[in-house]
Amino acid sequence: MQCPRDAVALIEERHEGIEVDHCPSCNGRWLDHHELDELEARAAPDENQRRATIVYARRESELACPVCGKLMWAFNYRAYDLELDTCEDEHGFWVDAGEEGRIRDVMEERVRGLNRAASAEQAWGEFLRGAGGRSMWDQIGGFFRGRRR
């Protein structure tokens, strides 16, 4: 396979335990379709934490798929400012130099956000149970009704 950026022959290497094709010239990497899932799983082992749309702001890319030669699609990965290119026939993803680390960072940030949300939801549930299941507005209304006497 050849690099979609500069047509240099890609070299197979292991990156974070995943076999990827690496361009020795531009330092980009070709991830087969399942290899992006594997890279994400390293940062977020729980499959529920990885569920969500990964393609946002899809547009035509100027790069051709190194497998089939068709023009790929560029997109913002998980709505972050991280552009990846993908083959519409699901051959894989082109990741420019340094972006594989940003994929891991995005997934780790997503996991932290989901953990914060779960913690906040649990705290809110405990608060409501402590309040007898009444809503905040019921409690405020009760406070003022009791002061009219």
Image (tube, helix red, strand yellow):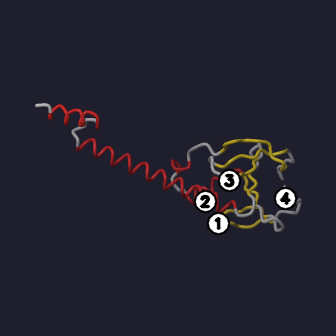
SS under mark 2: helix
Seen at 59% across and 60% down, the residue is 105
Asked whether the residues under the numbered discs 2 and 1 touch, taking CB atoms below 8 Å apart as contact, a structural biologist would say yes
Residue at label 4? 3
Viewer-side label of 4, 1 = 4
Q: Secondary structure at mark 1?
A: loop
Closer to the chain start, of discs 4 and 1, is 4
Give the residue at x 54% y 58%.
108
Nearest to N terminus: mark 1 or mark 3:
1
Q: Nearer the viewer, residue 9 or 147?
A: 147
The residue under label 2 is: 104
Q: Secondary structure at mark 4?
A: loop
* Residue where numbered disc 1 is placed: 16
Q: Nearer the viewer, residue 91 or 130?
A: 130
Residue type pointed to by label 3: Leu
Disc 3 packing (10 Å; few <14; some 14–19; many ≥20): some
| Mark 3 vs 4: CB contact within 8 A | no
The residue tagged 3 is 82
Q: Amino acid at mark 2?
A: Arg
Q: Earlier in the sequence, mark 3 or mark 2?
A: 3
Q: Relative to 14, say whether 126 is above or below.
A: above
Residue at image point 77% right, 44% down: 73
Estimate the spatial distance between the alpha carbons at disc 3 and disc 2, rounded to whole Å: 12 Å
Alpha carbons under labels 3 and 4: distance apart: 19 Å
